[in-house]
Image (tube, coloured by chain):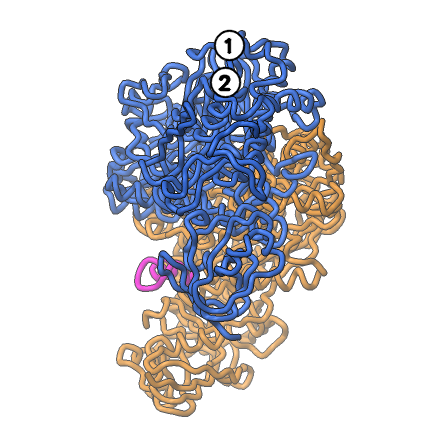
Chain colours: A blue, B orange
Amino acid sequence: MSTYKVTFLPDNKTVTVEAGTTLLKAAENADVYINSLCGGEGLCGECRLQIISGNAKADKIAIGFFSSNEIKDGFVLACQTKVNDNLEVMVPARSRIEMEKIITEGVQVPAPSGTSPEIGINYSEPTHVNLHKLPRDPALVDHPLVMKVFLELTEPTLTDNISDIDRVIRELRRKLTQQDYEITLDCLRHLADTLRNNNWQVTAIVAKHNGLGRVLEIEGGDTTDRHYGIAVDVGTTTVVVQLVDITTGKVLGVEGNHNLQARYGEDVISRMVFACGRGSLDALHQAVITNINSLTKVLAKEAGIELHEINCMVVAGNTVMSHFLLGLPPCSIRLEPYVPTAMVYPQILAAEIGIQISPDAIVEVLPSVSSYVGGDIVAGVLACGLADRPEISCLIDVGTNGEIVVGNHEWMVCCSASAGPAFEGGGMKWGMRATKGAIEKVVIADGKVEYNTIANAKPRGICGSGLIDIIYELRRNAIIGPDGRFDLSLKERRLFTDAEGPQYILAFPEETETGQAITITETDIANLIKSKGAVFAAIKSLMDYIGLKFEQLQAIYLAGGFGSSLRIEKAIAIGLLPDVDKSRIHFIGNSSVIGARMSLLSTAVFQKSIGISRKMTNIELSAYPPFMNEFIAALFLPHTDKKLFPNVKL
Amino acid sequence: MSTYKVTFLPDNKTVTVEAGTTLLKAAENADVYINSLCGGEGLCGECRLQIISGNAKADKIAIGFFSSNEIKDGFVLACQTKVNDNLEVMVPARSRIEMEKIITEGVQVPAPSGTSPEIGINYSEPTHVNLHKLPRDPALVDHPLVMKVFLELTEPTLTDNISDIDRVIRELRRKLTQQDYEITLDCLRHLADTLRNNNWQVTAIVAKHNGLGRVLEIEGGDTTDRHYGIAVDVGTTTVVVQLVDITTGKVLGVEGNHNLQARYGEDVISRMVFACGRGSLDALHQAVITNINSLTKVLAKEAGIELHEINCMVVAGNTVMSHFLLGLPPCSIRLEPYVPTAMVYPQILAAEIGIQISPDAIVEVLPSVSSYVGGDIVAGVLACGLADRPEISCLIDVGTNGEIVVGNHEWMVCCSASAGPAFEGGGMKWGMRATKGAIEKVVIADGKVEYNTIANAKPRGICGSGLIDIIYELRRNAIIGPDGRFDLSLKERRLFTDAEGPQYILAFPEETETGQAITITETDIANLIKSKGAVFAAIKSLMDYIGLKFEQLQAIYLAGGFGSSLRIEKAIAIGLLPDVDKSRIHFIGNSSVIGARMSLLSTAVFQKSIGISRKMTNIELSAYPPFMNEFIAALFLPHTDKKLFPNVKL
């Protein structure tokens, strides 16, 4: 079989592939990350490339995505174009998955005081563990998931010649309240030598497993001062890892990157289709393992820690991400009646899934509530303390899905609504994620548009918070009506109509990185209204189901990607959030990773997470008829029922 | 590097090896099994080979083992001779480890009635489980270690969409008393497909683990009628595997072979030296795994069973064998204060140690009592029911070590004494194991010797029961005195003296396979007296320690290699066994494999084994001063204290 060389610009990465390989696959081999919303089905038009030299024909199916000029210029879809020549290919900015460090906006490391003023909430207050005051004596500790216990054993004699492991356990029983232990075969195999080579002074690494102490490893000498874990948030879009000193509870570093699964599909649905169809589950499993391993490596290096010193990992993710992480098939999650393989996951060892920390480290995945309310939401409940207090409050996590929890220490009800990718920039003509060059803030006044971009770069597109601003500003200036349609009677040079329908120019060609105007179309606005309508309808449905009014919510916690860049009053004004007193709304940032860290540091908190997941009542909105009426009623700015938004003056 | 061909006769097996390889290693590569007591150290002289063609020089160290004629005829030690030419080599009969099926004498399969008259003991009586009356309903079963439970699950609906594993566990809770379950990641990974491809009708394979139900596998459809396990006795000399139908309790087949570890050393001590010195633990670990896998393969084929249908394995072996099986280093067992890594072993999965049955099958190793009283003895206690009855009885297992247990349902005391390899034919001029051609029965009368050989073949040597007969007959005929020395004043053509000292001819050259006379030397007799003296002294020391007389023993159970071929009256007469009424002495055959099978079939019995191991008091004879006096007193036929043997008239 003949092979060809493909060079990807501007990275100038070259790869040799067999004839017939798609350009998308070739890019993957070259470690060039290209957007692909649909998982290589030729449906989303995201993976556009420009052929610079060599012959490559776009298949018929791809032609619809390009103007005749673009076709002339050699634009093709990477997933639909096969390599049958040596090629030079340009990856346009909008097709690139940026691999630079993601903006960990909202990923807050609590200050040593336990209070993180930037995100307006005291983390140590609503939880059972004070992250910064863990005592060193393991007998007294609010036990972290994995403990290190230094043991000074007496040497065996003829009158005290119990087995090595019995000697270790006898001493553990003296030091800890735990009485029963189990041990891995691997640990047993090294035990005799470790004891004798270290003068019977060793450190036992012990986890809790099914009510027993699980002896994971016996290390020579006293290693109790080097005891680390990682807390991981596996989001559909990004993966965030925190390196934590288990002894002090301190966060030693935090890193995030884009979920590499994006190459197989932008959202969970397309990834499930890929995993269960022509693609493979293993590719998605390996992708997220690579994400975590690469972040952990960087963090460990920065902190001067060896990977084998990391003895515990706690992961929070939605149900589909948790399944991918563990290599569980997600196929039945996608279809009615939406059944996952598991909601509470077994404790496993890092080596079982290829996580490159200590091979005997334990991995705990926070439990899910349902197919579409996952461990990330349970982590959010832990982080905001919703389940610890008698007042009724609400947790809202808006991403591709919007998940909502309402409740208190006695009861909790939750649901999930598909918001679509709009808030993350997906499906919009110029939408993009919150990375460099994204328009994130917009004010329109007197026909003038003022915008801020992330990192003050030339604009490349618009991210979620920018889009919400734009809708608000267009409506405030009466450029669109309450139904989201442009008032085409306006004399406004930014407003024009072409084949894609009416649209509004936010940045003229001369202002932008690509030299093309950045606009918002009427279709974009309709999509955004659908997204905000879905989220609001979900909240409203849940409140009606319980029989509560919005004003009865003592607090609303906002988790997820928006972070603190969201202007709350604008989010209320377009009808995304309920019209409550602004002071009751708190950003809690990446509460998924915070809840994971809290569980890492306290077995009690981890066990509480299982209780929370079992206690929460999940409302399946697709099977709850009132939701569709609420959704339709919410497809207005702010809402068809103005009484729901008494304070909004649009 | 140059290579040479070595052909081993009479098997005519040829192997190509690099220059400098020892003949012992070459034989191993050729799958020709050669005796090696010392583990290739050139110390035992067991691995003698004859060079037929080609040049091969024996190293100096080996010369002492051969007569000058033998050196002329090309005899060398395989372990001390390196290959530097193409060679043809003859393996003499006495150097061969016979790989034919071992005589599973004493490995009795209880008859359907539960009574096995050949071995004089009713197995079903002293134990808690009637092996032949296990009911089919798992809810009623005296739970075997691994259960199969058929589940007819309801299909999920929107109002009943719990996760797949929760659905399985909900049904298990209805069928079994067990309420809490854990599951392996591997099983979870296949769960969704198995349920949906089998119309929600599946069979769960469940083990007990730390008080929880451990879901090992979910199979499609109803497979409960195919549910198998293996019970394994890993002896120092032989490995025996029984294939058991777990549903009916029936033994479907039994096979044994020689422990392949013999190539690294004949006894446990030399194997420990090999494992902890220049050799490797892994070689010994792999050897016994190969033993078990090859036997299991044969048994499964004969019974028409697939290997993956075998879901459980229970192993009984001495402490060193158990360590080798699990890959645990035995090094500290060998030296004072004789400390093993573990005495109770963790439940592991077959795949963890390369046992080729279902990879998710569990492996349980019966617990040890001390470094030299192992799971085989605990199995023996289970098999004879010693721990179930108020009467005091005694279990004696004679092999290279003699292990003795005395006790009843309330207490047990045990010890182990090194008997040396004499009873298994080791260290004797013409000693051999109980295989084809071994003289196993001898009567001497009026200067005539009558003998029987195993399989009625031409004599090749003498096995344990033959040696006991010979000592007895020589003493009865006053050819030796009570000190074991020949009466050289006798005119007896069978009695002569050469460089090896006085010896007695049992078979003349014309009668034997090798054409050489088979004799017993005074040194052989002295070794045997030491062996029997060690065993008797151990029994006597234990009785004195407890303060009991022999007549207080209601029963003596004889386990181990001797089997029913031992003439009890002769064993008493030479002072090996105490002088009690013959009717109280019972052969229980390979009680190691029987106890393993009983545990396989009943979780209660397996748990009892752990209780037994913890309850038994081990007396370390090397640290018990009276033992040495008892040993010296026992170096007489039958004993220096004739009052101990009132019924012996020698």
Mark 1 secondary-structure assignment: loop
Mark 2 chain? A
Q: Is residue B278 magenta?
A: yes
User: In the rendered structure, are the residues bearing label 2 and label 1 in contact, judged by CB atoms less than 8 Å apart?
Assistant: yes
Task: Mark yes or no: residue B419 visible.
Answer: no
Residue at horizontal 58 percent and vertical 9 percent from the top: A549
On the image, the x and y values in percent for residue B363 come to: 54, 48
Out of A365 and A377, give the one closest to the viewer: A377
* Neighbour tally class for label 2: few under 14, some 14-19, many 20 plus, Cα within 10 Å: many
User: Which label sits on residue A572?
Assistant: 2
Instruction: Give the extent of the magenta segment.
Output: B270-284
Q: Earlier in the sequence, mark 2 or mark 1?
A: 2
Quarter of the image where the N terminus of chain B is located: bottom left
- Residue drawn at x 56%, y 21% as measured from the top left: A637
Task: Place residue B503 in its image quadrant.
Answer: bottom left
Residue with the mark numbered 1:
A647
